[in-house]
Amino acid sequence: MKYALITGATSGIGRAIAEELIKDDCFVYLNYANDSKRADSLGEQFVKYSGQFEFVRTDMSEYNGIEVIEATLKEEGVHLDYLVINYGMTDRAAFEDISIENWEQVMRANVGVPCFLVQKLLTEELFADNASILCMSSLMANFPHSVSVSYGVSKAALTALSCNLVKFLTPSGIRINAIEPGFVDTPWQKEKSPEQRKRIEEKTALGRFAEPEEVARICLATLKNTYLTGSVIPISGGYGLL
């Protein structure tokens, strides 16, 4: 059995990836921060997968969350075959209203913590042989959006981080890639007004938002493909091409 860890795993794309990995005979550590109700609900939905997953509660927007991940893996004697960096944070303030504190919080959550999580797992030898890392970036790394400047910039940095780390991870046999989803029907996107959703759909060649499961299937294929590293894979539905 292979072992996987997904940050931000209890809803949306993270949840869908978790189910794909479990069905592929992986044991999956499901990270979440504070929403115990959502975690409990997912545990009930995943009851048919009993024995193939475990929740790890720690806030991956803060650096001390890394210590909890490290301690859990060491305590259970696990080496990760797959690491999915899915947790992300946004700030929808207008540019003139962005605070230094909120800017740094988004950068820490979306770039800083992922960087030092990989560093910690590498230096503590907590990756399995031929491990694979997947960074969940965003199409907004390339398409400036009307709000959340810090989100787009931080996701562009995460994409760059995944490419830069190839040089340092390859000697250990570890692959790393980035996925850049466009608009996916997650709880985040369901908060948009009908008018906002319509505008996005009109800019998307396929005329709709992606389903989380569609993204998850590409994520699983990317994690398992042994000739894929340093790649950046967009999943946009043709957003911006019309």
Image (spheres, rainbow, N blue to C red):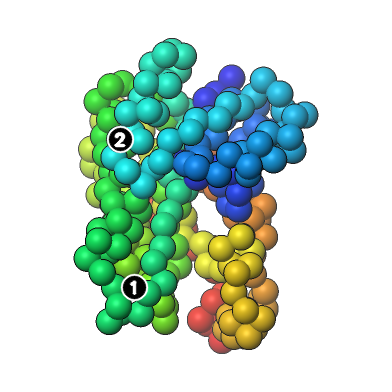
Residue 144 in the figure: left or right of residue 40: left
- Which quadrant holds the C terminus? bottom right
Give the distance between the C-alpha atoms of the residues marked 1 and 2, in whole angstroms.
26 Å
Occupied quadrant, residue 236: bottom right
Q: Is residue 185 something one can see in this rendering?
A: yes
Q: x%, y% of residue 14?
A: 56, 46
Q: Which residue is mark 2?
A: 64
Q: Is residue 136 above or below residue 4?
A: below
Query: How many C-alpha atoms fall within 10 Å of the one at disc 2: few (<14), some, or many (≥20)?
Result: few
Q: Is residue 201 above or below residue 63?
A: below
Q: Which residue is mark 1?
A: 149
Q: x%, y% of residue 194?
A: 66, 81
Q: Earlier in the sequence, mark 1 or mark 2?
A: 2
* Amino acid type at image mark 1: Val
Nearer to me, 56 or 25: 56
Mark identifier at residue 28: none
* Nearest-to-viewer mark from 1 and 2: 2
